[in-house]
Amino acid sequence: MKRGITVLVGVCLLAAGVYFAISKWGIRHETLDLFDAARQRPVAVDLAVRRDYEIKAEDGFWKLPVAIISNGNTVKNTEYSFLANALATKGYLVASIQQDLPSDPPLMTKPGEPYVGRREVYEKGESNILFVLGELRKLKPNADYDHLTMVGHSNGGDISMYYAKHHPEMVAKVITLDNLRVPFVTSDKMKILSFRSNDPNFKTDPGVLPSTAQAVKDGIDIIKTPFQHTQMSDRGPDSVKEKIQQALDNFLTDSSSSELSPNSTDNLLIAKPPAAAAPAAKATAPTAPVQPAPVVTNPAALASDPAHSGS
């Protein structure tokens, strides 16, 4: 009898733990092991979505905004859960794509060539994204695939920027964490946020960052951080992830203030100066996704080595 009670208590505690996690985050993760037959290439995807928003989208109340996360070289696509959860909390359908495979050749730097010889890597990443979007349109039709938010770390950030450059009609926002090779897209129709590391082993190539005037003109936010390049994933300390999440939240809610404020320097750190801090608001229940604005479809229902690493 005692054993039965112990088991029952254990089950209740487990259920309580699951309930607490759902009530706090409400985020569901799903793994898709896709295969692109045209290229004979497996493409793993980790999906993250807030279940309450997903249900409303399935019922035709709105379309979920979509975010695509691309991993840095040698980092797994599942090692950006702090970003995926932050975006999913905002109402996004988040697809974290495994961009590289163990069988892929190592990244090499070839000075003098466009993107230091990594164009093929970015083209492969672009193809992965296009393939995943095609599959998601079939699996998750109640999402907005015409105003994408591209997110990427290091090499994944370069893939994100490369994709935005070649598909500007599909991309609304780009968020990079220390991409080093592909120049920023300059367009006042695309919002860009980029976190820069303070890491002597990972230097941004000349011409990648826009000028201060161009950044201000196009509303590009560039934030210099004290973080190391390799800390910008789940492998980094909680303090780093929390700071990035705070700035990301500000960016997605059109706030110009951030705890990652710029230091005094002649180099561009952030395009828009931090605004005066507003009084702290009282905690409220989670709101519907803000960025991009939900597409209402049922109005009646709604009123390693710097030269050869993952850089």
Image (spheres, helix red, strand yellow):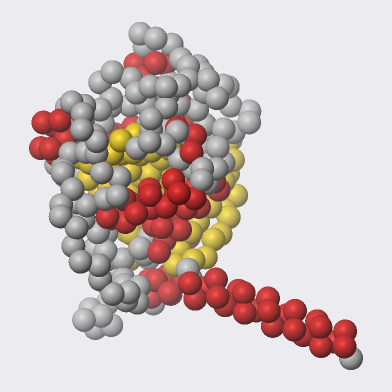
Residue at (43%, 11%) from the top-left corner? Answer: 110
Coordinates of residue 195 in the picture (x, y in percent): 33, 38
Residue 25 visible to an observer of this rendering: yes
Residue at (58%, 22%) from the top-left corner? Answer: 105
Is residue 91 toward the left or the right of residue 38 in the image?
Answer: left
Which corner quadrant of the image does residue 76 belong to?
top right
Is residue 215 toward the left or the right of residue 222 in the image?
Answer: left
Is residue 172 toward the left or the right of residue 70 in the image?
Answer: left
**Which of the pair 130/153 is nearer the observer?**
153
Which corner quadrant of the image does residue 141 belong to?
bottom left
- Residue sitting at the far bottom: 1
- Residue sitting at the far front: 264
Residue at (23%, 78%) from the top-left corner? Answer: 299
Residue 130 visible to an observer of this rendering: no
Coordinates of residue 221 in the picture (x, y in percent): 23, 41
Q: In which quarter of the image is the N terminus?
A: bottom right
